[in-house]
Every structure is written in structure tokens, then in C-alpha cells.
Image (spheres, rainbow, N blue to C red):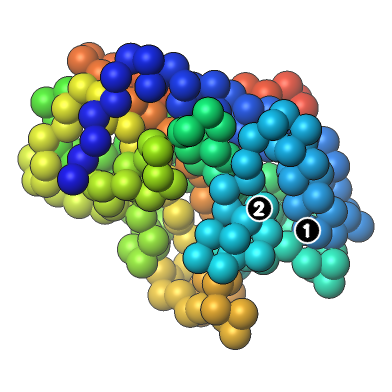
């Protein structure tokens, strides 16, 4: 069942998402060669707790951390570790959820570490562009397939692969609500979007082929060909004419400055 949010509920979600945007910016401040992904996780956990919110990923279906930190060919759900040390040229996707005042927020950003290869930077740029292409379709009267088509078309035209095993989703009182939001599809297909629907849209795009596997930890998904993958995510509310973006990358932009992709 799809739960349409009231204006008051949307504003509560916006506050949760604002805190999440600030959390990712705090993580961005410490991303550099030599830092471990466990250190990133500690920064996020402490910042969320200091602001009287709940790190919703921690313990979710047994997940052991606040962040998902997926490095290079890892797509999603990489587990932070003292053994994973970021190095120059890496990229790291940082994904997390926060529960604040009864509502969840969800966002992800792929960060460059030092000097990253131009072809990887272009993958990141195209993936983020695709996110906004999808968001443009999150309007009252459009269909769910319009979002997936916009993302798929933008990325495949650039020669990239869309990962299909993981999708976006509805979000609100629960971290994952109906409907699923695929990053591929056909225009005019799927349910009709209604004002008040809140969605987490999150393209996951690969430089190589789209085949993945799950590593032995039972969580980390990586590309079989070990080529890089990028992941960006924002939470939005469907509205007439233009989607209302609840999450923000603006805090990250302030931290990264000229290195903002």
C-alpha cells in the first residue's frame, strides 16, 4: 500500500533529510587517502546521535553499521571496516538513513578520494545527472516507468550499465515503503504518481557490464568485472508540476568546493 503524506508529514521528513545532508557533509570533511571507512562511520554515528536522531541503518535486518561505504567496484552495502583504507584515486559511495521525529530520510553520494581517473569522474557526473533526470519525472500524473526510463536512457546513451538488482523505494515512517522505484523502465508504464507520494530515487550505474555478486559478508554488492560503479540518492515528494526535493547535496557542495562533482 502506498502511503500519501500530509504537508505536515512532508515537513517532518524535510527536517530528517536536512540532518542527513549535514551528516554526509561531516563525513565529506574527513574523506582523504589514509582514512578508513570505519572512521567515516564513527563520524556519522556520533553526529547523528549528537542531534538526537537514530542511525536507522544500524541494526536494520542485522546490518552492523551506520553507513554503507562502497569503494570502487562495490555498488552498495559495503560494510565500514578498519581494514578498508581509502587511497588516492578511489571513489567511495556513502549511503545512510536517519530516523528523526518518526520519519526516515535516505540519501547517498559518491565521493572522489584524491585524484580520480577522468573516466571514473565522468561516470560519477553522468550518474548524478541521471538522478536529477529521474527526479524531473516525479510529478503528479506521470508514471513510475517515466522515472526509470529517464535514468536508463541518460546512462545507457553515455555507454554505461544500469544495475537492476537494487532499486529506489517509497520512504516515510518506514525506511522502505511501496512502491519500488526502478532505474530502468518504459515511458507510460507503471502506477500513476500522486501528490504526496515520497520516494527515494537512487541510480546505481556501472562503468562496465551490469552483472554483480554479493560478497561473503552477505551484504556488499560488487561488480563482477571489478569496474567502478557510482550511486547517488535523494528523497523527494511528488508534486504538481515539479518534484519537491527533500534531501540536499548543498552541504556536501560547501565542503567539497571546486572538487564537487
Q: Is residue 25 left or right of residue 143?
A: right
> How far from the left and from the top, in percent, is residue 208?
48, 67
* Image point (78%, 67%), residue name: 81
Q: Taking the image as drawn, is residue 161 in sight?
A: yes
Q: Taking the image as drawn, is residue 118 in sight?
A: no
Q: Secondary structure at mark 1?
A: helix
* Image point (78%, 58%), residue name: 37
> How far from the left and from the top, in percent, is residue 42?
81, 50
Mark number displayed over residue 67: 2
> How far from the left and from the top, in percent, is residue 95?
59, 49
Q: Residue 220, located in which quarter of the rendered image?
A: bottom right
Q: Which mark sits nearer the N-terminus, 2 or 1?
A: 1
* Image point (22%, 14%), residue name: 241
Q: Is residue 237 left or right of residue 83?
A: left
> How far from the left and from the top, in percent, is residue 8?
37, 15
Using the image as rendered, state which of residue 25 and residue 164 is in the foreground.
Answer: 25
Mark number displayed over residue 37: 1
* Image point (43%, 47%), residue name: 175
Q: Is residue 5 left or right of residue 83?
A: left
Q: Secondary structure at mark 2?
A: loop
Q: Is residue 187 left or right of residue 72?
A: left
Total marks shown come to 2
Crowd band around label 2 with a 10 angstrom C-alpha radius: few (<14), some (14–19), many (20+): many
Residue that protrudes farthest toward the right in the picture = 34
- Decide: marks 2, 1 in contact (CB < 8 A)? yes
Q: Residue 166, located in which quarter of the rendered image?
A: bottom left
Amino acid at each position: 500500500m502506498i502511503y500519501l503524506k500530509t504537508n505536515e508529514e512532508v515537513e517532518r521528513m524535510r527536517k530528517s533529510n536536512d540532518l542527513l545532508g549535514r551528516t554526509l557533509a561531516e563525513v565529506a570533511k574527513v574523506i582523504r587517502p589514509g582514512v578508513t571507512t570505519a572512521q567515516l562511520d564513527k563520524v556519522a554515528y556520533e553526529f547523528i546521535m549528537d542531534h538526537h536522531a537514530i542511525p536507522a541503518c544500524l541494526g536494520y535486518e542485522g546490518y552492523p553499521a551506520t553507513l554503507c561505504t562502497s569503494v570502487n567496484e562495490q555498488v552498495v552495502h559495503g560494510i565500514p571496516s578498519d581494514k578498508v583504507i581509502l587511497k588516492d584515486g578511489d571513489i567511495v559511495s556513502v549511503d545512510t538513513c536517519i530516523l528523526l521525529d518518526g520519519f526516515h530520510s535516505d540519501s547517498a553520494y559518491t565521493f572522489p578520494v584524491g585524484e580520480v581517473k577522468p573516466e571514473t569522474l565522468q561516470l560519477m557526473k553522468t550518474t548524478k545527472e541521471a538522478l536529477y533526470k529521474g527526479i524531473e519525472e516525479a510529478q503528479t500524473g506521470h508514471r513510475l516507468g517515466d522515472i526509470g526510463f529517464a535514468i536508463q536512457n541518460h546512462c545507457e546513451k553515455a555507454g554505461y550499465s544500469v544495475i537492476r538488482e537494487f532499486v529506489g523505494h517509497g520512504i516515510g515512517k518506514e525506511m522502505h515503503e511501496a512502491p519500488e522505484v526502478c532505474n530502468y523502465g518504459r515511458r507510460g508504464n507503471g502506477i500513476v504518481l500522486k501528490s504526496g507520494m515520497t520516494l527515494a530515487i537512487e541510480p546505481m550505474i556501472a562503468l562496465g557490464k551490469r552483472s554483480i555478486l554479493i560478497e561473503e559478508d552477505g551484504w556488499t554488492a560488487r561488480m563482477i568485472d571489478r569496474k567502478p560503479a557510482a550511486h547517488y540518492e535523494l528523497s523527494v515528494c511528488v508534486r504538481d508540476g515539479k518534484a519537491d526535493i527533500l534531501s540536499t547535496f548543498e552541504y556536501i557542495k560547501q565542503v567539497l568546493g571546486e572538487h564537487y562533482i
